[in-house]
Amino acid sequence: MKKLVVNADDFGYREGINKGIIYAHQSGVVSSASLFVQREGTDDAVRLAKENQALGLGIHIDLDQFFEVDHHIGMILDWISPRPDIANVRGEIRRQLEKYFSLGLSCDHIDSHHHSHLHPDIFPLACEAARDFKIPVVRFAEKIVLDPSRVAEMKGIIKDYSITTPDHFIEGWYWGNIDEHYQLAELMTHPGYGELWREAELAHCCQPTLRQYLIDQKIDLLRFSDAVASR
């Protein structure tokens, strides 16, 4: 049986997004979410997470302050100038994790806003933090690594730190993508209210026949913690 984690990014961004994520969890196929620890909707998201214990939860690290960002494609481009001290980046990752755990929440994965943790210079810091904070899963996707020439190096880091990463990453919805070949996949989505593209993703997550389709295709819908435990 294939295993699929449908993860909603941006939990805590604002209340309309939080509302959409919870609806997509309760009425759709979202099984997991990634939480901002310092946005206007964080307190609301924490309350909702505690009310919805079946929703898997991880941290959505925000390192935008260190990067130039292309908001149209949702990706970091390069370091700001002057380039920040990597020790400051490491400290910010750990500060956000300490804040997360102070909220009384469990954490089964690390990912990041605009995929900043997939910058090859930051990825080892994220994996180190995952090891130190006992977080089993770090998002990894070859196709969104900023420097493809360093993918092999990053895979070595995953092995060195004994981190789990899904063997397949699906970057957003299109019909048929859940039928791709994989053993364990993460499908990243951004459901929410207040923006047309988020509402479109919310609709995808809540298609009336989708949950039955997963059953028929023998695709097991999980949280990251479930997937790790079953390996």
Image: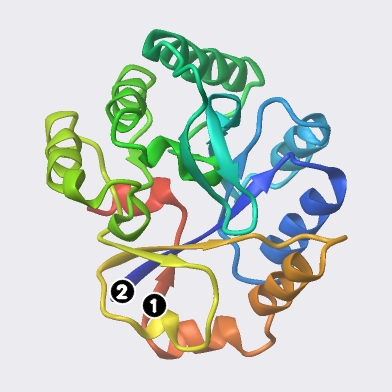
- Outermost front residue: 81
Residue pictured at 77% horizontal, 60% vertical: 192
Give the percent coordinates (x, y) of residue 184: 30, 64
Picture quarter containing residue 183? Answer: bottom left
Give the percent coordinates (x, y) of residue 130: 35, 27
Whether label 2 touches label 1, CB < 8 Å: yes
On screen, 40 above or below 151?
above
Give the percent coordinates (x, y) of residue 174: 53, 82
| Amino acid, disc 1 | Ile
| Amino acid, disc 2 | Lys
Nearer to us in this view, 53 or 60: 60
User: What whole-number distance in Å separates the C-alpha atoms at marks 2 and 1?
Assistant: 5 Å
Q: Report which residue position mark 1 lands on.
A: 219
Left or right position of 68 against 187: right
Left or right position of 48 against 187: right
On screen, 61 above or below 174?
above
Residue pictured at 39% horizontal, 77% vertical: 219
Residue pictured at 39% horizontal, 51% vertical: 226
Circle 2: element type: strand
Q: Badge 2: how crowded within 10 Å, few (<14), some, or many (20+)?
A: some
**Quadrant (top left/top right/bottom left/bottom right) for the N terminus:** bottom left
Nearer to us in this view, 59 or 88: 88
Q: Report which residue position mark 2 lands on.
A: 2
Picture quarter containing residue 190? Answer: bottom right
Give the percent coordinates (x, y) of residue 21: 72, 56
